[in-house]
Amino acid sequence: MKKTKKKIHRKMTNTQKSTSGQMRHSNPKRHGSRKWRRIQRYFGIGLIVLVVLLLILLLIKLFKPEWLPGRHEEQAGEKFEAIEPEIDVELLTVNPYSRPGQPTSKITGIVVHYTANPGASAIDNRNYFEGLKDTHTTQASSNFIIGLEGEIIQCVPTWEVAYASNERNIDTISIECCHPDESGKFNDDTYRSMVQLCAWLCMKFELNEENVIRHHDVTGKICPKYFVENEEAWKKFKKDVGATLADF
Ligand SMILES: [Zn+2]
């Protein structure tokens, strides 16, 4: 009822106004500009809302990337099991010093490290990480460790953050590699498993050899020592990973 009344009233005022010649043309114009102002206002509000949403998204991306969708995807199934290298799964206890239990975001790289602990075995290194839950001396770990006989130990699941690659912990898989002496050069058994594991992980996360990087590429640290001091050896390693991937 109210609406009809209003309409009639508006009509009447329009007619009344139309009796004055000046008002006759200015009135629809004024109505149009009001409409335009309203559109502008809505557009302005929409723009502000959009900017605020984008800002929130940016803050999440910077500080809480694990909240964003598309977090962790890995390929599984018979095809992947058939080419999986032998892995001894010896997961660490969830603790703030070596296995925070934090989910990763989408995996975009594989980071290769050296243990900087000449002659130590994979299990020695794994137990050192496990011991950090009691010693609290530092925060360190890695998803995998490859030993001097080519053995592979998994310490942290691939969908959880390990403390190895600084700001790239969140979106990479880390591999610590044992070495017999101070030079940091890997022996053949370790090297072979490194190539196999990197290629397999590339396959699982739909990456390629260019996504295999050194700790050095993240922070500039001399790690893995031999691959930082011998750029050609590093290039050859990536080539070997690429060739193995092609063979899968
Ligand atoms: Zn490292």
Image: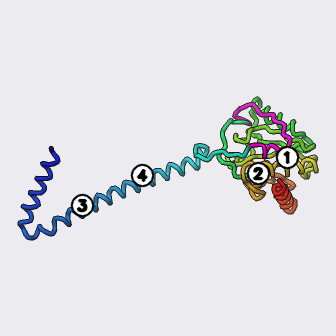
Residue at the image position 75 percent from the left and 38 percent from the top: 156
Query: What residue sits right under mark 3 in the picture?
Result: 34
Q: Position of residue 202 (x, y in %)?
A: 76, 51
Query: What residue sits right under mark 2 in the picture?
Result: 203
Res 11 quadrant in image? bottom left
**Residue 177, label in figure:** 1
Query: What residue sits right under mark 4 in the picture?
Result: 49
Q: Report if the CB atoms under discs 2 and 3 are less than 8 Å apart.
A: no
Magenta range is 77-98
Q: How far apart are marks 1 and 4 (CA)?
A: 49 Å
**Residue 101, label in figure:** none
Under 8 Å from ligand 1: the CB of mark 2? no
Q: What element carries label 1?
A: strand
The amino acid on which the numbered mark 3 sits, given as a three-letter code, is Arg
Closer to the chain start, of discs 3 and 1, is 3
Q: Report if the CB atoms under discs 4 and 2 are less than 8 Å apart.
A: no
Extreme top residue here? Answer: 134
Q: What element carries label 4?
A: helix
Residue at the image position 14 percent from the left and 52 percent from the top: 7
Q: Report if the CB atoms under discs 1 and 4 are less than 8 Å apart.
A: no
Under 8 Å from ligand 1: the CB of mark 1? no
